[in-house]
Image (spheres, rainbow, N blue to C red):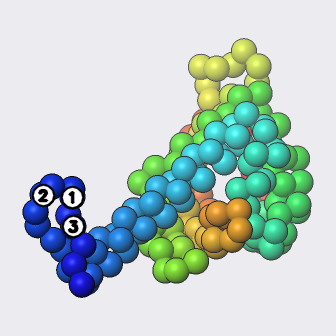
């Protein structure tokens, strides 16, 4: 069985080539959907739009973060993060994201660079920290959702006068 490459091109691809191309396209689309999920969620996090942010998480999600331990369940994750986000301004940068997709499950890695204004008007002395992200995702009826996030802190800079991440 062959399928046309494009209308009028006069060349054909085999069913095997077509299937391989379809798988590659699906893989790229899934990886882009995962990237978009993370960007949408973390932009909402910085705006404190908890409804948009938490819809990026699966109902049984787990957040692992050193100072906080493990938090289980979407609502518990939302409550903890909302309570621990007292900064007047914050930016979460997600760097070097990479994803691997296997059916309706995916994993991902990246780096966090978090910058926060700790006091109104004190923008010249922000607090920042960075470390590795390790993610697990599941695809459901609503699309891709974050099912587990592990976050480690490798470095900090500045003074966290708010101490939201203190152990």
* Front in this rendered view, residue 45 or 33: 33
* Residue 106 in the image, given as x and y percentages of width and height: 54, 74
Question: Does any portion of residue 164 appear in the rendered image?
Answer: no
* Front in this rendered view, residue 166 or 56: 56
Q: Is 154 left or right of 80, judged from the image as shown?
A: left
- In the image, what residue occupies the spot 64% across and 20% down? 123
Residue under circle 3?
4
- Secondary element under disc 1, as helix, strand or loop, is loop
- Secondary element under disc 3, as helix, strand or loop, is strand
Cβ–Cβ under 8 Å for marks 2 and 3: yes
Residue under circle 1?
6
- In the image, what residue occupies the spot 72% across and 15% down? 121
* Mark 3 burial class by Cα count in 10 Å: few <14, some 14-19, many 20+: few
Image position of 106 with respect to 114: above or below: below
Residue under circle 2?
9
* Mark 1 burial class by Cα count in 10 Å: few <14, some 14-19, many 20+: few
- Secondary element under disc 2, as helix, strand or loop, is loop
C-alpha span from label 2 to label 1: 5 Å
* Residue 42 in the image, given as x and y percentages of width and height: 64, 45
Tell me where residue 68 sits by quadrant: bottom right
Cβ–Cβ under 8 Å for marks 2 and 1: yes
In the rendered image, the quadrant that contains the N terminus is bottom left
- In the image, what residue occupies the spot 71% across and 29% down? 89
- In the image, what residue occupies the spot 41% across and 68% down? 27
Q: Is 128 left or right of 160, judged from the image as shown?
A: left
């Amino acid at each position: 069985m062959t399928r046309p490459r494009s209308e009028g091109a006069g060349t054909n691809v085999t069913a095997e080539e077509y299937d391989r191309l379809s798988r590659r396209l699906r893989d790229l689309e899934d990886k882009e959907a995962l990237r978009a999920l993370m960007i949408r969620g973390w932009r909402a996090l910085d705006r404190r739009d908890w409804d948009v942010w938490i819809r990026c998480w699966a109902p049984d999600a787990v957040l692992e973060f050193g100072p906080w331990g493990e938090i289980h369940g979407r609502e518990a994750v939302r409550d903890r993060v909302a309570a621990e986000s007292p900064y007047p301004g914050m930016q979460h940068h997600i760097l070097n994201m990479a994803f691997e997709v296997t059916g309706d499950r995916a994993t991902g890695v990246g780096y966090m660079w978090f910058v926060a204004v700790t006091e109104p008007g004190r923008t010249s002395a922000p607090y920042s920290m960075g470390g590795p992200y390790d993610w697990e995702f599941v695809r459901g009826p609503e699309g891709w959702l974050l099912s587990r996030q592990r976050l480690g802190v490798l470095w900090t800079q500045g003074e966290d006068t708010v101490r939201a991440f203190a152990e």
